[in-house]
Amino acid sequence: MENTFTKAFVLKVLFEAVVIGLFVWGIQFFFENKYKPITASEVLKRENFLNAKKNAYFEAIDIANKVMANLDYGSIDANTGNKIASEFLHKHPQDLSSFELEINSAYSKMMIFTSDTNILTSYFRIFVTPPTEKHIPIIEMRKFIVAIRKDLGNTEELPIEYKMLYIVMPSQQDSLP
């Protein structure tokens, strides 16, 4: 009877067992780490981060709206193209320096929470435009809103016919001659 457990056979079996074992261990290690359940503290940490990010965005939107509410707009109705009588136009002071701290505070918060340069650039350009370009803050506001929607996970595009408008409501004081 021939010896079936030769030295070569035993070494081959041991080698195959070690290789197969390492392969199975590697696959198991990969999937355990890749699909490891998220702990409650990790979920809470992510949720707090997203809430803080959302609040920073909302603060920036509020500040941009405040500044735009204090800008003078042209006398053309964006919906009809008709000229608006001067007595119905807001007359605001152009000095926006009182908003400087709020504008920069919101910008700093967004720099903490986002790495999307479209958000940061469009926010900045709501307030500052290069001298060679026309300053139209509502166009930058639309870019800002679209970039925020994308960053917060809203992948649904706004309809093409949607226009970002700033709604101006004349007050009695504005309409007095």
Image (cartoon, grey):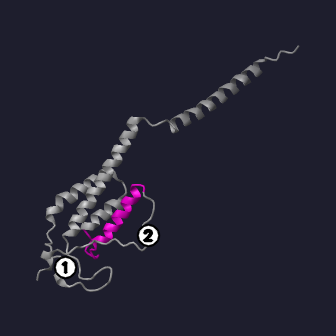
Q: Which range is magenta?
A: 128-153
Queried whether the magenta region covers residue 25, the answer comes back as no
The residue at which mark 2 appears reads as 159
Is residue 107 toward the left or the right of residue 29 in the image? left
The residue shown at (34%, 63%) is 145
Residue that extends furthest to the left in the rendered view of this protein: 177
Residue appearing at x 62%, y 29% in the figure: 22
What percent of the width, then of the height, locates residue 147?
Answer: 38, 61
**Which of the 4 quarters of the picture holds residue 158?**
bottom left
Q: Residue at x 24, y 73 (%)?
A: 168
Q: Which residue is mark 1?
A: 89
What is the total number of numbered labels drawn onto the structure image?
2
Along the line of sight, the residue nearer the viewer: 23 or 15: 23
Q: Residue at x 23, y 61 (%)?
A: 63
Q: Position of residue 25 (x, y in %)?
A: 59, 30
Q: Residue at the far right: name it.
A: 1
Q: What amino acid is found at the position of numbered circle 2 in the picture?
A: Pro
| Helix, strand or loop under label 1 | loop
Determine crowd level at label 1: few under 14, some 14-19, many 20+ residues with C-alpha closer than 10 A.
some
Amino acid, disc 1: Leu
